[in-house]
């Protein structure tokens, strides 16, 4: 039985600092939390500890046009690693489904690359990000 639609790429919207990206190709974000087994007497764990929580490295791949638009909004002579921290809002709106919105706070660009090769028909720019812990379904 079909229970509804799963998210499709066409159902996504990504907004960076209030600017809706029309030409993004990939977005990744996440979080991790350390858990460790605690051993007492014997060979098996007797309890589990909870450690710190942290954001996983983020990733945003955009077409050249969106990259240039974001960079033009920055001060002259800077590159993406100089951008101030920004917020990414990602919404998933499946046809006939419930809209889910995630907020990724405090995004900073660690690295970026720009270039093309002979076979390319378009240019993509990958931004590697350090982010805050994503807030899901806000």
Image (spheres, rainbow, N blue to C red):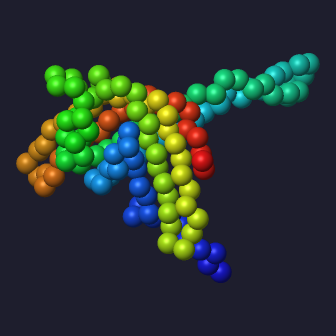
Which quadrant, please, contains the N terminus?
bottom right
In this view, the residue in front, 43 or 9, is 9
* Position of residue 114 measured from the top left corner of the image (x, y, whole percent): 18, 36
Q: Look at 81% across and 22% down and name the residue there.
A: 38
Above-or-below relation of 17 to 50: below
Q: Look at 13% across and 43% down and name the residue there.
A: 116
**In the image: residue 132, left or right of residue 107:** right
**In the image: residue 22, left or right of residue 49:** left
* Position of residue 124 measured from the top left corner of the image (x, y, whole percent): 23, 45
Quadrant of the image occupied by residue 33:
top right
**In the image: residue 107, left or right of residue 112:** right
Q: Residue furthest left?
A: 118
Q: Look at 19% across and 45% down and name the residue there.
A: 64
Q: Look at 78% across and 25% down and name the residue there.
A: 49
Quadrant of the image occupied by residue 117:
top left
Tell me, yes or no, if residue 118 can be seen here.
yes
* Position of residue 25 measured from the top left corner of the image (x, y, whole percent): 32, 52
**In the image: residue 92, left or right of residue 52:** left
* Position of residue 48 measured from the top left corner of the image (x, y, whole percent): 81, 28
């Amino acid at each position: 039985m079909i229970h509804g639609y799963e998210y499709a790429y066409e159902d996504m919207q990504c907004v960076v600092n209030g600017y809706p990206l029309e030409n993004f190709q990939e977005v990744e974000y996440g979080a991790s939390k350390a858990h460790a087994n605690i051993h007492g007497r014997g060979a098996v764990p007797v309890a589990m500890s909870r450690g710190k929580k942290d954001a996983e490295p983020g990733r945003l791949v955009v077409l050249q046009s969106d990259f240039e638009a974001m960079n033009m909004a920055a001060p002259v002579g800077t590159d993406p690693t100089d951008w101030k921290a920004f917020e990414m809002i990602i919404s998933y709106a499946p046809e006939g489904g419930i809209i889910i919105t995630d907020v990724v706070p405090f995004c900073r660009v660690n690295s970026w690359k720009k270039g093309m090769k002979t076979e390319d028909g378009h240019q993509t720019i990958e931004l590697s990000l350090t982010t805050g812990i994503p807030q899901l379904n806000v």
